[in-house]
Image (spheres, rainbow, N blue to C red):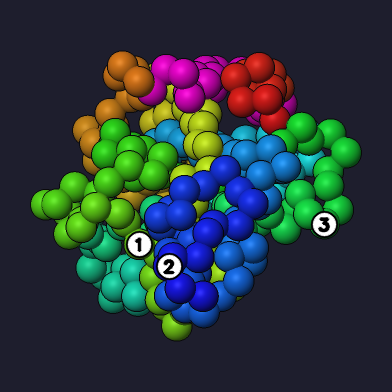
Amino acid sequence: MSEATAAPDTHLSNDDPALVEARAQGMDEKDVVLAEEHPRPALVIVMGTCGSGKSLIGSLISQRLSVPFIDGDDLHPKSNVAKMSAGHPLTDADRLPWLAVIRSTAERICKEQWEGARPENARRPTCIIACSALKKKYRDILRGEPAPADDGGDGQAKPPSPSNLPNKAHPNAHVPASDALDVYFVYLKGSKALLAQRMRERKGHFMGVKMLESQWETLEEPSNEGEEECTIVVGIDQKPDEVAREAESGLRERAGV
């Protein structure tokens, strides 16, 4: 299919990154994007520092909404896993394909979910992924904004190649997410003292508290102009079920999920 061919019946322009890459790889565009008659897919990022309970709360929200949940740590490209296993820290350039594959996996899962056995409680195709998303620029990339040039970006963060995809990524996740994907954040907010207490109660608490110190210094809370509309802030000084219930209420109101 040439680039001159009109885009399929979607919300997207003909030069959308998902459609361009699908054409380049000889794929049917309808394998990677939802048709226009379907609601826009929603990616919900459950974010926060270590100790905030991202995986637990993300799982509870997914159960309440009857939508899929993935732990973002399981979506690191194979090259990132090898690097971390060798004891080397990831750079922001290493994180670009990881953030991109979080987006593309979410959109592909939303597509299959909505076109297959649609969840009876869901009002739009939704996928929930736990990811710390500590820096604003990470959240910007997750929303589909251009990657900073100093991080190796050339305008758009790109997912890893098929051979570098993690096992839990969607098979078509090497194709970037489209501009139709809407992204929302659930920020699990807690005091440093509460987070440190939780980390001390875990096994290996010494390294955990050291990790919290580092993440606390890195954290840029989503309070900047432009982030409020897509962010639900939930205090974690309550029971997990109460945190999940408050997040669900905010998402239904804010995102229509």
Q: Position of residue 5 (x, y in %)?
A: 50, 65
**How much space separates mark 2 and mark 1, taking CA atoms?**
19 Å
Residue type beneath disc 3: Gly
Tell me which residue sits at (50%, 69%) in the image. Answer: 22
Crowd class of label 2 (few under 14; some 14 to 19; many from 20; radius 10 Å):
few
Asked whether residue 19 is drawn in magenta, I would say no
Residue type beneath disc 2: Glu
Crowd class of label 3 (few under 14; some 14 to 19; many from 20; radius 10 Å):
few
Q: Which residue is mark 1?
A: 158
Asked whether residue 229 is drawn in magenta, I would say yes
- Pick the residue in front: 85 or 47: 47
Q: Which circle marks residue 169 in the picture?
A: none
Q: Which residue is mark 2?
A: 3
Left of 233 or right of it: where is 64? right
Q: Which residue is mark 3?
A: 116
Q: Residue furthest left?
A: 150
**How much space separates mark 3 and mark 2, taking CA atoms?**
29 Å
Task: Look at the image and tell me whether residue 243 can be seen.
Answer: no
Pointer 3 with pointer 2, Cβ within 8 A: no
Give the label, 3 or 2, closer to the camera: 2
